[in-house]
Image: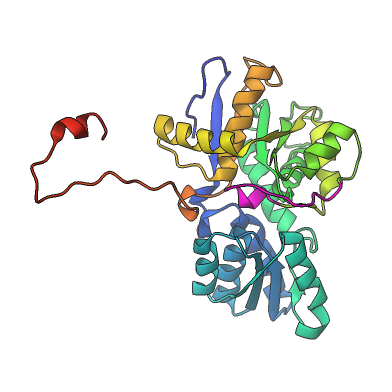
Amino acid sequence: DSPGGPAGGGGLYVKDEGRLPTGSFKARGLVMAVSMAKELGVKRMAMPTNGNAGAALAAYCTSCGIESYAFAPEDTPACNIEEMELQGCKVYKANGYIDDCGGIVAGGMDKMGWFNTSTLKEPYRIEGKKTMGLELAEQFGFDDLPDVILYPTGGGTGLIGMWKAFEELELLGIRPKGSKKPRMVAVQAEGCAPIVNAWNDGVEFATRVDDAYTRTAMGIRVPAAVGDFLILRACRESNGYAVTVTDDEIDAAQKEFGAAEGILLCPEGAATYAAYKNGLTSGAIAKGETALLFNCATGLKYPMPPSNKNIDITKPVDYEAIKKGM
């Protein structure tokens, strides 16, 4: 989708991953991981999840007869937990963060006999996420990729996969050697920003964030990313950057974009729009640069603000009130 964007931008595009099976970009990586697991004879798979990855694991495992387990932070949106269970997954909530849930998965490998499908613990999810970069290259005609890609970054597999795709397209000769590649921007929530902290400190590895918090963008609440150095490397090699946005900015961006464009961004996707606007203001994104936002899931998978406009049909309808939006 190309909604245009705020005045002053050189053109704004949205890659809407909510249209994929299970409603998020997690389907890309998990279809590869589960397909290869099936081929290699795996019978049981487990993973930590903030919601969407577990839903994709559940759907693909159930479809091919693999038993699935998911472990999620206790404040994961209820719709995500219910979605996983309805699709045949055994789901457990834990009073910790996603990396704590990852510890549960790792600790049960011998006792439970499951395959650890955590981020970057197997080689195939990254190949599925790489398709985001391959699709973008095809959709933009291979030679004219956006100047900037803003990516909501938790574990960061998609950002790593896209950068891998752009490099491999050159190695294969599909894009000319030295072709312009997008500047990669890792967007994180202010309350959970290990990658941004490492970026600002100029270091290769990120330090875990204690007491990580974000009000709604649970998908990017990852206190410690296994692939931190790969995320940072992609940002640096592309002359991109890493940046935070506040919870209030995320909420405002989601509301603004929905009202202006009719696209219901998920909170993580809204974070990229907030970062884009801030980038234009600060000059980090030049006025003439084209930019692409990743809306990593449909906004329908997240709690939404209440709508409390009611009509009592036992009384005359007040059309003046309706006209005023009351």
Viewer-nearest residue: 33 or 230: 230
In the rendered image, is residue 15 in sight?
Answer: yes
33 up-or-down from 314: above or below: below
Specify the farthest residue to the front.
315
99 up-or-down from 169: above or below: below
Q: What range of the chain is rendered magenta? A: 207-221
Residue 210 lies within the magenta run: yes
Quadrant of the rendered image containing residue 60? bottom right
Specify the farthest residue to the bottom.
111
Viewer-nearest residue: 282 or 16: 282
Quadrant of the rendering where the C terminus is positioned = top left
Percent coordinates x, y for residue 254 in the rendering: 50, 37
Residue at horizontal 79 percent and vertical 78 percent from the top: 108
Main SS, magenta residues:
loop
Residue 153 lies within the magenta run: no
Percent coordinates x, y for residue 315 in the rendering: 9, 46
Specify the farthest residue to the right.
203
Viewer-nearest residue: 199 or 298: 199
Quadrant of the rendered image containing residue 169? top right
Residue at horizontal 39 percent and vertical 48 percent from the top: 306
46 up-or-down from 317: above or below: below
Residue at horizontal 19 percent and vertical 33 percent from the top: 321
Percent coordinates x, y for residue 148 in the rendering: 67, 28
39 up-or-down from 181: above or below: below
Residue at horizontal 76 percent and vertical 40 percent from the top: 163
Report whether 156 appears left or right of 319.
Answer: right
In the rendered image, is residue 172 in sight?
Answer: no
Percent coordinates x, y for residue 55 in the rendering: 57, 64
